[in-house]
Amino acid sequence: MDDLSDHLVWEIMNRVKKTVDRNSASLVCKRLYKLEKEQRDFLRVGCGLNPATEALTSLCIRFPNLVKVEIVYSGWMSKLGKQLDDQGLLILSNNCPSLTDLTLSYCTFITDKGLSHLASCSKLSALKLNFTPRVSGWGILSLVLGCKNLSILHLNRCLNVTSTEWLEHLRKLESLEELSIKNCRAIGEGDLIKLGPSWQKLKRLQFEVDANYRYMKVYGRLGVDRWQNKWVPCENMLELSLVNCIISPGRGLAWVLGKCKNLEKIHLEMCIGLRDCDIICLAKKSRKLRSISLRVPSDLSLPLLMNSTMRLTDDSLKAMAQNCPLLESVGISFSDGEFPSLSSFTLNGILTLIQTCPIRELSLDHVYSFNDVGMEALCSAQYLETLELVKCQEISDDGLQLVIQFPRLSTLRLSKCLGVTDDGLKSLVGSYKLELLAVEDCPQISERGVQGIARSVSFHQDLSWIY
């Protein structure tokens, strides 16, 4: 080691990625220990910190160049020792001058006071909170006021965040590029308008409403009316994910869908009120769209959906086929309880999309209209590499046998499909056409039946879903 140049040793250590290996290497000699100290810029800690404050202090002193820190207490129990509290965040702010990315997950002892300590971290640009029940909107506001470079903010199950003044302050900063709000019960669709000009720079938005809370609470129209006659600049949006949202016709988030001209990826799951005209408007505006995932509510899940104008139809799929020439990933799913006769997407609409766009990944869940005829049509899908079929009960062995004829398919996933058996896979035995075959909870396919079909095989059988 003494004969190697500093540059070469630095390069060797930089290629050792696993934490356990870097720890072992640093014990070999003082030279590697010193390099490890200088190079380590990422730290992930949690239940192993005991006593927490002293252990974190020691780590911060040893690794002064930390840029990214994750504190995760998943699976924590009291017998593992006290969790890191607000004092721990004070230690980070005092000893990690280069800190830019911080994740706090299941940190139940962290409060608003702890977040206020982070306000002095001038370089902090990314904060991710996952189930921090003692943090409120005031704590987030204090951090936003101090961290002028904040560009990424994730809030997941932050149940005590009831005020949204911090959204109004982000409006002034105009630095936010990625915002994720999931299952924060007091934050609704109408609050997003408070971002104002910050929409201009926003590239990624994830907004998910707690489904159980949504359906227990009666919402007024104020939240969606706030959007009326408002200019929301979202031309730079690249990724958009909306889950369990109410999309009011002609207003609110429905209006946003038709303004994202650079959108590349969109996920719409159980969005009540979504109409054909919303998807058509999106398709015409977002010609750079590469990925779309739609999970449609059951037609009988809410009385609102009995109105035929509130159902997505083949018109949406055809609009994407005509206007999205780069579309390569498609996911279509119906919620549990969907009836075959009420499916809004027909086989014709799905095939129009597949045959027109260069689809590489296709995922169908509860799509009863997709059958053996659809599988036959996939024989001409020149770009299809990954196919996932979940609860597609109209597919039989005859359709499954056609997989051997798919031009470029390398990954096949089958889950909870009742109509396929070992016989449907026999044409693939010994061909190793597939790189990966994953079979999960298909009652008529055995573990023996999947052997010799792909280079990598995954098999799982749990039939409790049937009963």
Image (cartoon, rainbow, N blue to C red):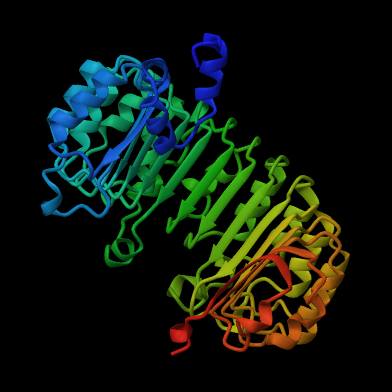
Occupied quadrant, residue 315: bottom right
> Which is nearer the eye, 444 or 14?
14
Occupied quadrant, residue 302: bottom left
Count up the numbered dots.
0
Instruction: Return the x and y of residue 37 as percentages of the image width and height.
Output: 36, 19
Instruction: Return the x and y of residue 174 as percentages of the image width and height.
Output: 43, 21
Vertical placement of residue 66 versus 296, above or below: above
- In the shown orientation, is residue 66 left or right of residue 439? left
Instruction: Return the x and y of residue 416 as percentages of the image width and height.
Output: 56, 79
Query: Which residue occupies 55% across, 9% down?
Result: 5
Q: Is residue 103 visible?
A: no
Query: Which residue occupies 64% across, 47% down?
Result: 282
The quarter of the picture where the C terminus appears is bottom left
Q: Can residue 320 be seen in this view?
A: yes
Query: Which residue occupies 75% across, 47% down?
Result: 324
Vertical placement of residue 311 versus 193, above or below: below
Query: Which residue occupies 36% across, 33% down?
Result: 194
Vertical placement of residue 108 versus 248, above or below: above
Instruction: Return the x and y of residue 99 as percentages of the image width and height.
Output: 34, 21
> Which is nearer the eye, 237 or 223?
237
> Which is nearer the eye, 224 or 356?
356
Vertical placement of residue 371 versus 36, above or below: below
> Which is nearer the eye, 76 or 327?
76
